[in-house]
Amino acid sequence: MFLSSLRLYQFKNYESFGAEFCPDVNIIVGKNGAGKTNILDAIYYLALTKSYFHSTDLPSIQHEKNLFTIKGIFSSPLTPKGGTDTIEDTKGLNFNIFLGIEKNQKKILRFDEVPYTKINEHIGKIPVVMIAPADDTWLHAGSEARRKFFDGILAQIDNLYLGYLLRYNHFLTQRNSLLKQCEGRTNRIDLTLLEQYDEELLYLCDKIFEKRTAFLEIFIPIFLEYYDFIAGNSTENTESPALSYVSQVAQEDFKQQFKNSLTVDIFKQRTSFGIHKDDFEGLLNGYSVRKFGSQGQQKSFLLALKIAQFFVIQQQKGFSPILLLDDIFDKLDDFRMQKLLEILQNPIIGQTFITDARPERSQHLFKNFIKKYQFLEL
Amino acid sequence: MEFSSKLIAQAVKEIAKLPGIGQRSALRLALHLLKQPEAYTNTLSQALQDLRQKVRYCQKCHHLADENICEICTSPKRDNSMICVVESSQDVLAIENTNQYRGLYHVLGGVISPMAGIAPQDLQIDSLLARLVDNKEVKEIIFALNPTMDGDTTIFYITKKIQPFNLQTSAIARGVPVGSELEYADEITLGRSILTRLKM
């Protein structure tokens, strides 16, 4: 599946915009501020109905306007690659996705003109992987960024997981609101209601923990393979990278600890135990890559995470996600850039979008590229 | 819109405040009223005044009523051994329209949601418990709440609260709507329908 055509209206810097794309590599070049990244974000929007860069939709609406729309026409190749529950298997060769977002209104999302009643049902139909400079939040921000990274992948490949996570977040907000209303006094809590929320949360903790654990078992080997490839590690020269999942749920007496923390929870007015405290730690030779890794090691680590994300989704879905590479050449040194180009030539990788502020650099890099590519100048 | 008459403008302004009615429809209604005999507008305004002044909530089930106790609660034809718990009066009307239920009702006035500022004591839960103390005839409580996370929480909460009364509890079935197609049912609904399938 690939995006053949894109139409934007009042989206970020575009009053209106239209472009056609090729099924292989699309290189978007233009000056800084021309709106290269915005095109990638629009594609991301069509897949996940939200921006990769902003947590709300308002910054994506053109200044002084009230709404934006994005329409994409997707084409499926003639030979389906199999897999279930994917658009690839369904009848039409072409389908279009329309997303309209207006201030203070519900999002409108349509698949071939038919509106979705639940937007969640769309998530995962058009898998995408974005690699952008902002990814370094994985290393430098709090645990939330790392949970979001893995949740984002799991949500695209496992609809049940997304359901669990949404339920968990709902009940967590309810429990926290209940705690806040006690204003720190233990005698004011409605224990029957609290128990109800605890029961739900503990059940969902188990489910989400199981899903995250099972997911990492698939993810880690792929990640390690690409880390070694990108870092140029051989059998003699290895950095022994690792990725570990740190969760309170793994502790044997987790349920007891959760229940015991009630007094503390009432005092702090929030829930101290649960999967919302999970974290993921990257290690090199047993040391935290976030704290002790060199710049180069950190870059390889991030790139390997993203490449692994791509291949895991590809493996689970049975077809390739759309790959969006934002300003990647500015951030990588020659060695890693060559490695990335080698990966991009892998026939498994489908449609790819790359932005670059320096067209001559991309032209040079893609000189010997074996796949088809096309330049789009803004 | 500019009117030749301030009186029409005023009527349109008031009618347009009703849900689902815009300026244009309001004007059409106002003009329609003008064409009717005066007796009709008198009856209409009397009905509206009575509606506002005389309709109240039933002290037993909190459904809409003319007297302190509603006609469903006082009817000798209703089955006093069943109480159907619903969120709002609209839900009572919806169930009544089915002609499938002959028991009593209890209108909660919402569902529990701390984040929306709705605590159990803001709902008619205590009054339900009081009803069960007073009325020993009740054998079964039927929950007909919306199938949302908060609806379910409210069901479980009330179930725990009424445990001492040793009643039979049930919730309305959830599944594929009549006349729809399996293909279009969402996974949760379809999964549940399979688990709670019916014997034929």
Image (cartoon, coloured by chain):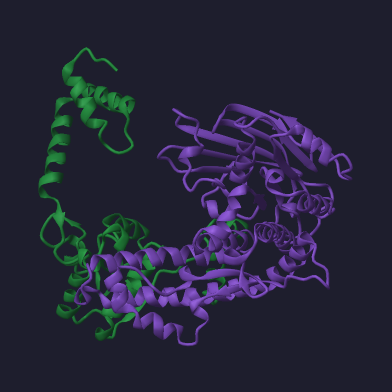
Q: Is residue B57 above or below residue A182?
A: above
**Residue A47 visible in the current orientation:** yes
Q: Is residue B141 above or below residue A343?
A: below
Q: Determine which quarter of the picture holds residue A74.
A: top right
Q: Nearer the viewer, residue A377 or B191?
A: A377
Query: Residue, x 43% and y 37% (percent of image)?
Result: A103
Q: Determine which quarter of the picture holds residue B181.
A: bottom right
Provide residue A195's location: percent of width, then percent of height.
Answer: 34, 78
Report the side of B183 relative to A88 (left or right): left
Query: Residue, x 80% and y 54% (percent of image)?
Result: A339
Quadrant (top left/top right/bottom left/bottom right) for the N terminus of chain B: top left
Q: Is residue B187 above or below residue A257?
A: above
Q: Nearer the viewer, residue B133 or A3?
A: A3
**Residue B141 visible in the current orientation:** no
Q: Is residue B101 above or below residue B8?
A: below
Chain painted purple: A
Provide residue B149's location: percent of width, then percent of height.
Answer: 41, 65
Chain painted green: B
Q: Nearer the viewer, residue B111 or A106?
A: A106
Provide residue A285's location: percent of width, then percent of height.
Answer: 68, 74
Report the side of A234 relative to A102 (left or right): right
Quadrant (top left/top right/bottom left/bottom right) for the C terminus of chain B: bottom right
Provide residue A240's location: percent of width, then percent of height.
Answer: 72, 73
Please tell me how many numbered marks the rendered image carries.
0
